[in-house]
Image (tube, rainbow, N blue to C red):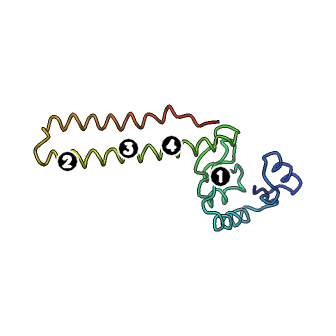
Amino acid sequence: MLTGDRKEYAYRQAEIAGIDRENVYYEMTPTSKAEVLRQIRKKNGNISYVGDGINDALALKESDLSFASYQGSSLALSSADALLLKPELSIIVDALLISRKTYLIIIENFIWAILYNVCMIPLAIMGYLLPSLGALLMIFSNLTLTVNSLRLRLYKPDK
């Protein structure tokens, strides 16, 4: 937790959020927040940041994935990668789960399209596949990819 607030208030808020005291940085300036994020990235890899104020803009830009509250400052909103439309941090986990599911569906669609083309193009070149049948199979393939993509609408992250 990076905050510009005083030590006592920062520790109280961290306790409410379930954050250990050694992970709380208090009385931080915008520049020092960005520097701490750089250090954390070197140590742990990709980082995400949630902020809502003008003093969070540098940190939002420094992180790999950033979120700002829809009630935040206009500078924070323009600096963030995504906006939180509810005042709940749990929706960040939902967003990450949905993005992971989306990525898996994209991979499935690529595999299907590659397999289809690897099988059907040689058959068409060798003359074993009538052009009209090839066109129908291509429509079927496109519908398959569309239906597979629409599965994402049914996905609800576990709470």
Residue 121 image label: 2
- Position of the N terminus, as image quadrant, is bottom right
Lower position in the chain sequence, tag 3 or tag 2: 3
**In the image, 73: left or right of 125?**
right
Lower position in the chain sequence, tag 2 or tag 4: 4
Q: Residue at x 24, y 38 (%)?
A: 138
Query: Label 4 crowding class (10 Å Cα cut-off): few <14, some 14-19, many 20+?
Result: some
Check whether the beta carbons of the residues at disc 4 and disc 3 lie within 8 A of each other. no
Lower position in the chain sequence, tag 4 or tag 3: 4
Residue 101 image label: 4
Label 1 and label 4: CA atoms lie apart by: 31 Å
Query: Label 1 crowding class (10 Å Cα cut-off): few <14, some 14-19, many 20+?
Result: some
In front here: 105 or 25? 105
Label 3 and label 2: CA atoms lie apart by: 18 Å
Lower position in the chain sequence, tag 1 or tag 2: 1
Badge 3 element: helix
Residue 75 image label: 1
Q: Residue at x 65, y 47 (%)?
A: 68
Q: Quadrant of residue 57?
A: bottom right
Of the two numbered discs 1 and 4 in the rendering, the one whose residue sits closer to the viewer: 4
- Residue on which the image places disc 3: 109
The amino acid on which the numbered mark 4 sits, given as a three-letter code, is: Lys
Relative to 79, is 133 above or below?
Answer: above
Among all residues in the image, which is located at the extreme right?
A: 8
Query: Label 2 crowding class (10 Å Cα cut-off): few <14, some 14-19, many 20+?
Result: few
Relative to 70, is 10 above or below?
Answer: below
The amino acid on which the numbered mark 2 sits, given as a three-letter code, is: Ile
The amino acid on which the numbered mark 3 sits, given as a three-letter code, is: Asn
